[in-house]
Image (cartoon, helix red, strand yellow):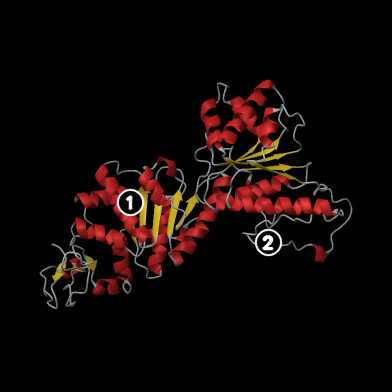
């Protein structure tokens, strides 16, 4: 059975289907309850060869919550809702709880007013599907028609192996997915390696992208592993917001890749005081160096490009600015690695021990290639020929590949023959921000008055004057 066909002003009435099998209004003079219509029109007409939801069906979907739930294809996931989810997520790792909380809030916001595309990525077991199902259930509660569809099931429906909408064929089903007010595609990347599958997915994505139809995509594999054509559409940042629940999923070790949770909570751009140590008077040049470092770091965080070297003594705010950059990029859903240099070298050394479950090449390659790397406290490591060689290999690769990198250090070598310092001074790639202010931590005995406590707030996109 297919959709009703309309020719001119003639409407075909009547159907022998049971009322329970009708998606539309049984009394509708257009579709007689089928829910779908097509038109006998000339070739070239925009409606030629297309099936469209009947107006009566759209009215039913926006007024009948039971019909919305049936339409959604949620099945057992109907019970998954935001108010039943833990705000911290299923992981015991503090850094993953931080990422989940950010994603949870964004998904709730999206569900209340779907706009653009949302891409959710991360390892198995981190709550991706539960967030996606919660978006659909929240939308239904707000009477927004939404469909939840695992991609493997999508292909099965098209092939005819399954058909959740018994009164429609494969063409009608595809139109339904293509035109859905809100579509959630789960397990994206788990199936569809054939040319036919790729073509159908691209047709679906291209139509929804061009029509700006709200779409949520839950990736079952890292974005980098998708077919290039699919990756170009899914990863298009013009309408897509990416939520990564496992930004360190590519990392071979669990405790390397992000600052500690307390640092992430404490060290933001809003909590950074560019006036310096309030217990000490700053000279004009000191104040200028601190404000300039703050402004450049904030601009870099908006769109990381090139290298930043934050240079200064202990306690002048270098690590605070570096962690604030990490926060901004995590909230943007991008991959970033933060490594305290001595700890990084310890991890590399440990890969050579019998107890290590990670090989050296695996760990070192991840650090070399991560899109944004923050190396904290370069120069604090134990000096040895091996350590210097590893750092040299890392820095040379990222310098040659021009991969975004932030380095905090207490000083640069004056030796022009030092291969590491030479690259850190390269003006074509590197911005060196020298911070010459008193230690923030050394407040002496002076107490701050109440009127001194507010911190200044700067606009997120504040640019730097030359």
Q: Nearer the viewer, mark 1 or mark 2?
A: 2
Q: Position of residue 395 (x, y in %)?
A: 62, 32
Residues packed near mark 2 inside 10 Å, few (<14), some (14 to 19) or many (20 plus): few
What is the distance, in whole Å, between disc 1 and disc 2 at their CAs? 43 Å
Residue 75 versus residue 122 in the image, above or below: below
Q: Which residue is mark 2?
A: 458
Residue 346: which quarter of the image? top right
Residue 42 versus residue 418 in the image, above or below: below
Name the residue nearer the viewer: 297 or 79.
Answer: 297
Q: Position of residue 290 (x, y in %)?
A: 76, 51
Q: Position of residue 341 (x, y in %)?
A: 66, 34
Name the residue nearer the viewer: 366 or 303.
Answer: 303
Q: Earlier in the sequence, mark 1 or mark 2?
A: 1
Name the residue nearer the viewer: 129 or 52.
Answer: 52
Give the structural element (helix, strand or loop) at label 1: strand
Q: Position of residue 417 (x, y in %)?
A: 72, 26
Q: Is residue 80 in view from this perspective?
A: no
**Does the CB distance between marks 1 and 2 fall below 8 Å?**
no
Residue 150 image label: 1
């Amino acid at each position: 059975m297919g959709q009703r066909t309309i020719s001119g002003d003639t409407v075909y009435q009547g159907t022998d289907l049971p009322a329970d099998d009708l998606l539309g209004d049984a009394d509708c003079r257009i579709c007689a309850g089928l829910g779908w219509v097509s038109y006998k029109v000339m070739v070239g007409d925009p409606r030629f060869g297309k099936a469209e939801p009947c107006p009566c069906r759209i009215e039913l979907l926006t007024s009948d919550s039971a019909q919305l739930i049936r339409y959604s294809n949620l099945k057992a996931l109907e019970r998954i809702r935001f108010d039943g989810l833990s705000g911290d997520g299923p992981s015991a790792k503090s850094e993953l709880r931080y990422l989940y909380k950010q994603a949870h809030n964004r998904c709730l916001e999206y569900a209340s007013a779907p706009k653009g595309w949302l891409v959710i990525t991360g390892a198995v077991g981190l709550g991706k599907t539960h967030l996606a199902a919660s978006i659909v259930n929240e939308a239904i509660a707000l009477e927004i028609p939404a469909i939840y569809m695992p991609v493997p099931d999508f292909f099965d429906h098209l092939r005819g192996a399954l058909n959740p909408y018994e009164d429609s064929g494969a063409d009608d089903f595809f139109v339904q997915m293509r035109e859905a007010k809100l579509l959630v595609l789960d397990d994206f990347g788990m199936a569809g390696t054939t040319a036919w599958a790729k073509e159908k997915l691209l047709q679906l994505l291209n139509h929804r992208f061009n029509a700006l139809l709200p779409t949520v995509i839950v990736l079952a594999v890292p974005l980098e592993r998708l077919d290039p054509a699919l990756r170009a559409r899914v990863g298009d940042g013009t309408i897509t917001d990416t939520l990564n629940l496992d930004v360190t999923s590519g990392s071979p070790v669990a405790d390397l890749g992000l600052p500690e949770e307390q640092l992430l909570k404490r060290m933001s751009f809003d909590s950074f005081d560019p006036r310096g140590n309030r217990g000490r008077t700053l000279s004009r040049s000191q104040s200028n160096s601190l404000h300039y470092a703050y402004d450049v770091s904030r601009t870099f965080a908006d769109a990381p490009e090139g290298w930043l070297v934050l240079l200064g003594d202990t306690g002048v705010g270098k690590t605070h600015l570096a962690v604030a950059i990490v926060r901004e990029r995590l909230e943007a859903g991008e991959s970033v690695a933060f490594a305290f240099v001595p700890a990084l070298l310890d991890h590399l050394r440990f890969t050579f021990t019998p107890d290590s479950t990670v090989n050296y090449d695996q760990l070192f390659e991840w650090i070399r290639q991560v899109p944004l790397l923050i190396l904290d406290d370069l120069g604090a490591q134990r000096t040895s020929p091996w350590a210097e060689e590893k750092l040299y290999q890392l820095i040379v690769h990222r310098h040659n590949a021009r991969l975004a990198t932030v380095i905090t250090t207490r000083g640069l070598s004056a030796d022009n023959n030092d291969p590491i310092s030479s690259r850190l001074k390269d003006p074509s790639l590197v911005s060196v921000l020298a911070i010459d202010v008193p230690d923030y931590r050394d407040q002496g005995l002076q107490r701050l008055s109440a009127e001194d406590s507010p911190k200044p707030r700067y606009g997120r996109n504040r640019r730097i004057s030359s």
